[in-house]
Image (cartoon, rainbow, N blue to C red):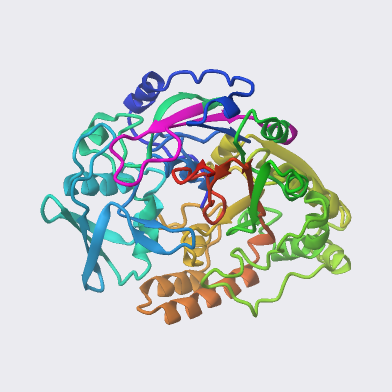
Amino acid sequence: MRRGARRVPGAALVAALAVACTATPPAEPGAASRRPNTLKVALRADVTGFFPSPSMANEGFSFGINFNLFEGLVSFDHQLRIHPALAERWETPDERTFVFTLRPGLRFSDGTPVTARDVAASLRAATERRWANREAFQAVTSIETLDEQQVQLRSGLPYIVLLSRLPRGFVLPEAAIEQGIVPPPGTGPYVLASRDPGRGFVFERNRHYRGAAPGFSRVEFEVVPEAAERERRLRAGEVDLINDVAPEMARRLRADPAVRVATGSGTRVLFLGMAVRRAPFSDPRVREALELAIDRAELARRVYGGEPVELATQVVGRGIVGFDPALPAPVLDRERSRALLAAAGFAGGLEVTLDGSSNRYVGDEAILHEVARQLALVGVRVKVNAADKADFFARLDRRESAFHLLGWAVETGEAGDALEYLFRTPDGGVLGTENTTGTSDPDLDRLIDEAARATSIEARTATLMQAMRRVAALRPVVPLVVQPEGVAFAARIAWQPPLGNALELATARLAR
């Protein structure tokens, strides 16, 4: 998922964060090869925050990093299958009730026991304090403890995909929540030892972790924005792992026997969002004209150096439940695009600002400029506004952007994840919280809500596909590409990255 910053009450959180996180020591050249128990990682950009800091965005990258520190009742494996995490088992007495039984002997990183009260307090706080993970609980109506080891969740409807929302339901100590401690103790394989915002942070092994000890007792993350510098450091042995490896870099690195490369299309679709209630995008002819003006194949060739990239036909990719294979790909027809613009009153051209990030998606700034170049061919003059991702997300949250490049990763494996938050009319709760286009359509809302009430996967899938077709007809977005995901690491490291190449590093070890 994405994206924007969330606010949590209490200045105590900000103050505690400043006290708890000290400066990260500068990297020492060649240290990666001399400290076998330390993993050194070079990141393109910093996290937006550590849970539940008010700065933390609902952003896939930040959540991926936080999964090293915190756990939910359940988790995903590398193929997006649900597995027990803090809960050793669960039961469903009826179609609206889940009862989770915690594993015995669980402890937070500070050594205190994990109880059902901590679970209940954490899940309630996610919605009451509007934390970045509150989307996970949109269907939950009550959270109760049954005893010290059991917690019961009830939903207001037979929400068959509730389990897929719960990996982000991070569990914290009830006392830490009440005291506003940031960072709070967690149950993940690592703890946050220090942070220097904008420059990096350090993890150390959680001695009380329930699972196998991580292969590295210490992980040092450094922010290195320049792709060429990240590549150089990896080749020189100064770091062990780098992220945001674009296809062209991946091709070069595969020729290096000292490096391993993991790439894939992941689940994140990049698209252009248009504010459908603001001129000129309130005119459906303008939205259609922009869609017809974009050559996705040419965009992919120019941005990704000719490497194979999956073109997007809708806001979820192939393999996602709810993807409609019958939905035709948007066509390229610049002659019709110019005619539509003229009919909308823009025969003499149109000026727009295109907002986006400069350090969030693979090739994001290059995509912005390529979109601007292509739209100029139909008379649309585009001013590109590429900003640091934190500033860009904040702009989206304030609904100040009428035209923007955005990405959405369906980490649950099914399209309801995107539809409920990107296109549902906001309900004052969590539905529609990421609706940056202002889409509000009764027919689409009905389909999204009907899918949520479905009592079988088959019925839910069919309804989600109908909703995808309705989105295509409304045209609030122009799908572009399924983002290529890539990481590269030293051959001395044995690691199987999860789907989407999230930096969940507990299983990384020295190769034998």
Residue lying at the far left of the rendered structure:
147
Q: Nearest the camera: 217 or 248? A: 217
Q: Is residue 297 magenta?
A: no
Q: Is residue 77 left or right of residue 188?
A: right
Residue at the location (18% across, 50% down)? Answer: 104
Where is residue 156, by image quadrant?
bottom left
Residue appearing at x 33%, y 47% in the figure: 211
Quick one: 286 or 194, which is closer to the camera?
A: 194
* Image location of residue 429, percent across then percent down: 37, 54
Q: Position of residue 428 (x, y in %)?
A: 39, 53
Report whether 501 appears left or right of 459.
right
The quarter holding residue 26 reads top right
Q: Residue 150 placed where, x, y %?
A: 16, 56
Q: Is residue 429 left or right of residue 508?
A: left
Along the line of sight, which residue is nearer the eye, 499 or 430? Answer: 499
Instruction: Tell me: residue 461, above or below residue 246.
Output: below
Residue situated furthest front in the rendering: 512
In the rendered image of this protein, does residue 288 appear above or below residue 201? Answer: below
Relative to 12, 400 lies left or right: right
Q: Which range of residues does the magenta coloring cover? A: 201-228
The reply to whether residue 428 is visible in this rendering is no
Residue at point 38%, 63% (across, down): 82
Residue 496 in sight: yes
Let me know if residue 203 is in the magenta part.
yes
Where is residue 183? Give x, y as percent.
Answer: 36, 30
Above or below for 53 versus 410: above
